[in-house]
Image (cartoon, grey):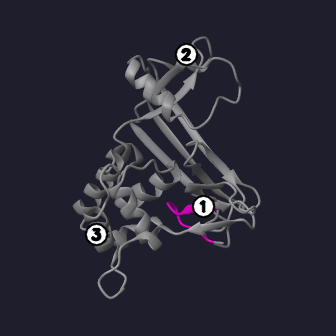
Amino acid sequence: MRAHLGDQLVIESPATGGARRDGEIVGLHHDDGTPPYDVRWSDTDDVTLVFPGPDAHIRHLEDEQPTEAGGAPTTADEAAAAYTAYRPPGTGHAGDIGRRIAVERRRRGLSREETAGRARMSPYYLAYLEERPADPTLATLIRLADALGTSVAELRGGGIVFRTAPDSVAAQAAEREVAFEVDHVDDALSQGWSVLAVGPARVVTDPEAVRGLAQRAHATPWAGGEREMWVSIEPADLTGRRITPADQ
């Protein structure tokens, strides 16, 4: 089983007429597209780590792209244009991140195929990101930013937010310049990545913004308790590195 970002994982119940569950693959843990996957489930919008069983299969994003008359596959650019033309009403428009990706790509004179190759992703997933509202993972944004010669902060057009309690140590970071680091290490494959953001931190006070952040949160605090204070960081400097085995 192999997948790209944006593909759909479908799990069919072995019982006749049983429940069926599906979700978008939003995170890959292996460069060759093999499991496990981070999946955002369509029924709950939760993101979980999934090791697919025998009742699961992948529905590739490119399988749903339009084809030219006679059945010949289109290019990624043509497929995206056709998909836009035939998009059913009410399915939404390109998100802010997608528009920024498209602008940066065109500014550098790159095709979708060239950009996708540089970012190590399917050109159909890149078309999906540019044409529809999407919430790509940080790892995806890092690869795209590197491919386009820009930063994650520029593609996001915003900053980093985290949730904490008003009386916590983390809450004391508000109204100061801080450093925020995110790491991932895979001991089994001797690889990982690290991203460091430096910039001013501020408490999010707008009720509408707080409500939106709470609705889009895909996890609950591991420490438990009431942690309803949101702090945003607007990166002034964003750096990172990728760790790979010595033989690669």
Residue 85 lies in what quarter of the image? bottom left
The residue carrying mark 3 is: 82
How far apart are the alpha carbons under marks 3 and 1? 24 Å
Q: Position of residue 42 (x, y in %)?
A: 54, 49
In the current view of this chain or complex, which residue is farthest to the front?
Answer: 17
Q: Is mark 2 on a helix, strand or loop?
A: helix
Q: Which of marks 2 and 3 is nearer the N terminus?
A: 3
Q: Identify which residue is drawn at 54% across, 34% down.
A: 217
**Considering the image in quadrants, where does the C terminus appear?**
bottom right
Of residues 224 and 40, the one drawn nearer to the viewer in this rendering = 40
Magenta span? 2-10
The residue carrying mark 2 is: 172
The residue carrying mark 1 is: 9
User: On the picture, is 93 further left or further right than 136?
Assistant: left
Q: Identify which residue is drawn at 67% across, 73% down.
A: 247
Residue 117 lies in what quarter of the image? bottom left
Q: Residues within 10 Å of mark 2 (few under 14, many from 20)?
A: few
Predominant SS of the magenta segment: loop
**What amino acid is labelled 1 in the image?**
Leu
